[in-house]
Amino acid sequence: MSNPFAGLIDLAQPRLGSGVVYATDDFFADKARLIDPAEPVFIPGKYDDNGKWMDGWESRRKRVPGHDWAVVRLGAPGEIHGFEIDTRHFTGNYPPGAALFGCVSDDVVPGEGAAWTPLTGKLDLRGDDRQYVEAAPGGVWTHVRLDIFPDGGVARLRVYGTIHKDWSKVGPDAVLDLLAMENGGRGLIANDEHFGRVENLTAPGRGKDMGDGWETRRRREPGHDWAILEVGHAGFISEITVDTAHFKGNYPDRCSIQASADATGSPEEIAKQAEAWPVLLPETKLQMDHVHVFTTEILPHGPVRFVRLNIYPDGGVSRLRLKGRIA
């Protein structure tokens, strides 16, 4: 099943600063693995002091009334659109039921008086499965609680949404990366994500390896590859950084950027509109494993909300930064 929340940010990913801050029990499998960005794996014959090693969060068999739960502190407050609950490799030890809640708290671990709001009803789970669930609309949340009924193991939890930034606190002369994930920037769609996802272009810091960037397959036909991204707030761009960190024999030969203040419809519809967007950065040569910074090359433009990064003909880019002032 394809991800219906593609183009949204996983608000629970660790590189945003998210963490699993509490669990009633994680005897069999560490609660931190619940939001590990890697795909869950099963390693036959691997055991630790408490039993079979499992790649996820797993509690003991409950012998008293009640149920277990885990709390995730989001790296940035956000509006939640949906969840992915992944029980892969958990078969005779998955929880048959679950529910998700959100709250707003300044504490790392919300106290007993925290007001938890239901974001889903009670869900039926299956073993070795992935389930996508829409969240109740409305609200900006700092924490998510996953309740499981009554106990068991969940491999991964993804929390899809958009980051909420208080732009009223950003002055008109402040210059910041408008495309940064922590500022609400996000990748919407790319024509090819064979080796790396477009959302990596907006992630914090420099890429840790080639897998931590956007990379397309080798193009064997005419044309070039592209990605569409949305900045967190419309603005005027004064500096562009194209970072090809770790990409050496597979960096793009050249790149260009188009931009628009407006776009409507689905990501696929926006991608079609983007073909005619004005040029922000003309086609320019790139180098391997290099931080390219462009300022004087940027063409005059109005407010920018969406950009299309074109790479010629294919290859990998680690990060894209668009620094500027908000419009």
Image (tube, helix red, strand yellow):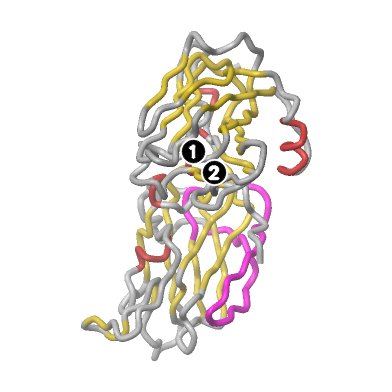
* Residue at the image point whose x is 50% and y is 71% from the top: 147
> Does residue 150 lie above or below 276 as drawn?
below
Point 67% across, 57% down: residue: 4
Whole-number angstrom distance, CA of label 2 to CA of label 1: 6 Å
Q: What element carries label 1?
A: helix
* Residue 136 image point, x, y percent: 67, 57
- Tell me where the magenta segment starts and ends, as one range: 116-144
> Is residue 297 positioned above or below 190 on the image?
above
Residue name at image x 32 percent, y 84 percent:
52
Q: Mark 2 points at which residue?
A: 198
Tag 1: amino acid: Leu
Residue 132 visible within the image: yes
Q: Which of 30 and 262 is in front in this view?
A: 262
Q: Determine the secondary structure under disc 2.
A: helix
Q: Which mark identifies residue 201?
A: 1
Q: Identify which amino acid the numbered label 2 is placed on.
A: Val
- Image location of residue 200, percent across then percent down: 48, 43
Asked if one can make out residue 106 in the rendered structure from this viewpoint, the answer is no
Asked if the residue under mark 1 is in contact with the one under mark 2, i.e. CB atoms within 8 Å, the reply is: yes
Circle 1 residues within 10 Å: few <14, some 14–19, many ≥20: many
Q: Where is residue 71 in the image (x, y as percent from the top left)?
A: 42, 61
Which quadrant would the N terminus be assigned to in this image?
A: bottom right
Quarter of the C terminus within the rendering: top right
Residue 143: within the magenta? Answer: yes
Residue 157 numbered mark, or none: none
In the image, residue 10 sits, relative to residue 85, either above or below, namely above
- Who is closer to the viewer here, 87 or 150? 87
Locate residue 27 relative to residue 320 in the image: left or right: left
